[in-house]
Image: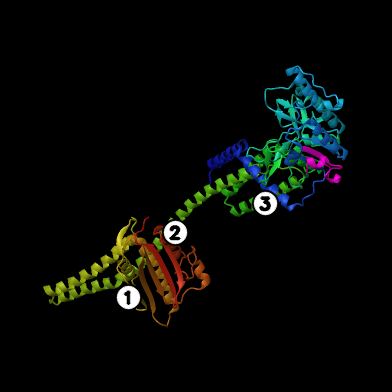
Amino acid sequence: MINIKKSILFVLLSGLLHFYFYTSQHIKKFDYELYDAFSNIFNKVQPQENASFSVIIDIDDKSIEKLGQWPWSRVINAQLINTIHQIKPVAIGVNILFPERDRVSPLAIQEFYKKFFKLNVNFIELPIPFRDNDNLLSQSLHNANATIATYFKNTPYQDPLCQKLSYKENQFSKIGADYFATSLTCNYKPIQNSVSNFGFINAWADSDGIFRRVPLFMNYNKKVFPSFALASILSFDKNIKLNHNQSTILLNFSQKKPKVISAVDVLNGNIEPLDIQGKIVILGSSIVGLDPKYITPNGKKISNNMIQAIVVENILTNKLLSQPKKYKKIHIFISFILSIIIMILFIKREYINIILFLFIVSIITLIWLIFSYINGIYISIGYLWIPSFYFFMLTLAYYLHIRNKEKQEEEKILIRQSKLASMGEMISLIAHQWRQPLSAINGIVLNIDIDHRKEILNSNKLDEHLNKIEETTAYLSKTINDFSDFFSKNKYKEYFYISDIIQQTKELLAISKDNNIKIIYKEKEETELLGYKSELIQSLLIILNNAIYACHKNNKNKEKGKIIIETKVLKKSIFISIEDNGGGIDSKTIQQIFNPYFTTKQKPHGTGLGLYILKLIIEESMSGKISITNGKEGAIFIIKIPINISI
C-alpha cells in the first residue's frame, strides 16, 4: 500500500509531468503523428469526391518550352488571363507576384534607351494600348475581377505602397488571426491598384517538417488580411461565413485533387471549356525554383497552387478542419484527472477496474475524436492520451517493482515454510531412524548389566558391547550431521559429488528399511559439481517424496514400488532423471503441477507448495530447468543444472 506521503508525491509528479508535456515540443510532435495516423485512416475509409469547384492552370515546363523562359512578358500573362476569362470561370486567382515593372514593356525600353543612350526609340506602328505591358495586365486583371497574390514577411523593410494596403475597409477586424507579420510584399503599383481582391500565399510546414495547416487570416499593421484562396472565393461570394475559430485550418486532403491544365494548351485552345466554366481558376507555375513543394502527412509532395486549390475546395464543401487551442488545455486537465484516478485504482489494487476504466476512456475519447473530426474540429487528442499513457506506464513500472519485491518476500516465506514443513518430516524420519538404534543401544546396556550380574563380563565381552554402541552412536551422529547440513542457514557454494548427494538423500528419507520401495541409482560416471548442496538435497527430497507417495498410492497389493535415478553429463550441464512406477499424471494435472497450492494429495499429505518450491529452487537458485513427462510406468522428472553454478 502506498502511504499518504507517497500519494501526494505521485500527485505532484503527475502535475509536473503534465506541465512538462503542455510546455514542451515533444507532445506537439506526438500529437502531429496521432493526427496524421487518424486523418490517413479516416481519408481511406470515407469516399473520395471529385474536385468540383477549382482547376489549376499551370505555367509548366511545356509552356516555357513553347513560349520562352520565365518571366514572360506581361502581355502574354494578360492574354492568358483574357483567354481564361472568356471561357467564363466563376473566379480567377493569379498565384504569381508582380512586384516590379515589366522591363520588356515597350515604354520601359523607350525610357531605358533615352536615359542611358540619349536615344528616342519610337514604336509608331504599335498601338498605344500595347506600349505598356503592365497596363495591359492591369486591364486584364480588372476586367476578369481577378484575385492577385501578396506575401507576408517578418523583415524590417516596409514598402510604402504595401504598408497602406487594407482589405475592403478591414471587414475581418473581428476575427482574431493567429499569425502576425511586420512587412508585406505586394505588386507593382498599377497592377496592385487595378484590383480589389488580393490575398497572401504564405504556407509553411509544422516544426516536424510536415505540411498540415494554413492560415486563413493574418495580421499586418493592425489590419486583418485574408488568404489568397479565401480572397478568390470572396471575389464572387462576399457573404461567405466562417467560424471565428477558423483563423487557421488543417487541410483536409481526402478530396480528389483538382485538374491541372497546361497554360500553353489554354492559349492554343486545346482544352475542354467545361473544365474551366463555372470554376475557380488558380493560375500559377510549377517551374522548379518558382513554386516550392511541401511534404504532406501521407508522404506526398504538394505545390502552393495545389494548396490554394484544396483550400478552395475545403471551404466550399464545408470540409474545413480547425484545431482550437482551448482543447489542449482541456485535455491536459482531463489527463491529469485520469492519472489521479488511475493512481487511486492502483493503490486499491483494482487491476481489472484499471483495464476496464482505460478501455471505456479510450472508446469515449475515440468516439469524441471521430465525431469532432466529422464536424470539422481536431480536438488535439494527443494532449489527453499521451500524458495519461506516460503516467500510467510510470505507475505500472513502480507497482511492478513493488509487486516484484512482495513476490520475492512471499517466495522467501514459502521456502521457509517448505523448510519448516520438511523439518517436521525430517524429525519424523529421524525419529524413525533413531528408534531401532536406540533400542539396540538399550539392549546392549541391558546385556552389559546381565553379564555383570552373572559375573561373566570380561574385558573382551565389554569391548564387544562398547564397539556395538560406538557403531550405533556413529550412525546417529551421521543422521544429525545430514540433518544439520540440509537446514543450514549459511548458503554457500561448495564442491560435491552427485552420487554422495543422492546417497545422503536416500538416508534422509529412511527408505532403506522400507521393503516396499526400491531405489535404483544408475550412475554412468562420477560427476563433481560446484553449487548449493543443501538446495539440491531439498529438490531431490521433494521429487522422491512425491514418487514414494505415488508408488504407495498406485501399487497397493501389486508389484513393489520402484524409483530409478539416472544422471548424465551433456556439455556443461548435468541431467538428473527420476522415474517411478506410480502410474503417471493425467494431462490436465501435469499442466498445473508447478502452480503454488495445487495438490492432488489428500490432507495431511500435501500443501501444494512442494513442486512450486522445487521449480523456484531449480530455476532461480540453481540457474537450471525442471520438466515432467509421463513414461511407460509412471512420471519422469528431469532436472537440468549447470555443473558449475554461476549465481
Residue in front for this viewpoint, 123 or 340: 123
Q: Amino acid at mark 2?
A: Leu
Residue 196 is at least partly visible in this image: no
Residue indicated by mark 2: 414
Residue indicated by mark 1: 513
The numbered dot on residue 413 is none
Instruction: Give the label, 3 or 1, closer to the camera.
Output: 3
Residue indicated by mark 3: 360
Which comes sooner in the sequence, label 3 or label 1? Answer: 3
> Mark 3: which secondary structure?
helix
Q: Quadrant of the C terminus?
A: bottom left
Image x and y of residue 430, in percent: 32, 68
- Residue 274 is left or right of residue 309, and the answer is right
Crowd rating for badge 3 (residues with CA inside 10 Å; few <14, some 14–19, many 20+): few
> Mark 2: which secondary structure?
helix
Residue in front for this viewpoint, 148 or 528: 148
Image x and y of residue 545, in percent: 40, 70
Give the magenta range: 261-283
Q: Residue furthest bottom?
A: 558
Q: Quadrant of residue 131?
A: top right
Which comes sooner in the sequence, label 2 or label 3? Answer: 3
Q: Amino acid at mark 3?
A: Ile
Q: Quadrant of residue 202?
A: top right
Q: What residue sits 86% from the left and 39% below the top?
A: 90
Q: Please determine whether, in this image, residue 425 is positioned above or below residue 172.
A: below
